[in-house]
Image: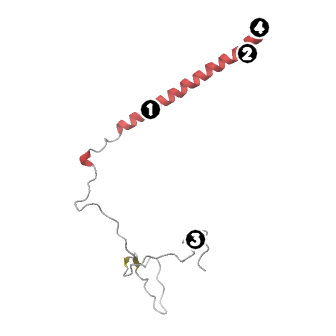
Amino acid sequence: MTTASVQLAAPSGLLSLMLFVVGIAVIALLAGGFWMGSRIKQRESPRPRPEEQPQMPPGGPVHEIRENREPDEVPVTPKGGRPLTPYELSNMQTRPSASKDRPRWSKGSSGSFGGGGLGAH
């Protein structure tokens, strides 16, 4: 062997050793992660048993109810009176609406601000 081939072989052996060490380090990190995950899982409460699972109501499944609602009106301020502040208003309630028609957006409108539609014309 010539000295040039020996000089080229030395760095590649060191490179191989470094790759081996990095591989072992990655395997050690993965194994440590699994070990730590199993320790955390052991500290958690056990899974609920089948009898502890949620049960269906006796009347069967609950279905969605669709209804239109109307807001209560804001009290009218008497002429010359002081307007109410937000703190003086009660929690505004809603009540079922007599109308069964669902509100729709106007034709040509996307229904949202800045939605890109043509808007109502």
Query: Which residue is depicted at the point 58% across and 25% down?
Result: 22
Q: Quadrant of residue 3?
A: top right
User: Badge 1: few (under 14), some or many (20 or more) residues near its Cα, within 10 Å?
Assistant: few
Mark in front: 2 vs 1: 2
Name the residue tied to disc 3: 113
Residue 52, x across and y down, in percent: 26, 48
Residue closer to the observer: 46 or 77: 46
Residue closer to the observer: 36 or 16: 16
Look at the picture and state if 6 lies above or below 50: above
State which tag comes first along the sequence, 2 or 1: 2
Name the residue tied to disc 2: 8
Query: Which residue is depicted at the point 43% across and 76% down?
Result: 102
Name the residue tied to disc 1: 34
Q: CA distance from mark 3 to mark 1?
A: 49 Å
Look at the picture and state if 69 lies above or below 53: below
**Where the C terminus falls, by quadrant?**
bottom right
- Circle 3 — which element? loop
Query: Identity of the amino acid at label 3?
Result: Phe
Query: Identity of the amino acid at label 1?
Result: Phe
Look at the picture and state if 10 lies above or below 64: above
Query: Identity of the amino acid at label 2?
Result: Leu
Q: Furthest-bottom residue in view?
A: 79
- Circle 4 — which element? loop
Name the residue tied to disc 4: 2
State which tag comes first along the sequence, 1 or 4: 4
**Where the N terminus falls, by quadrant?**
top right
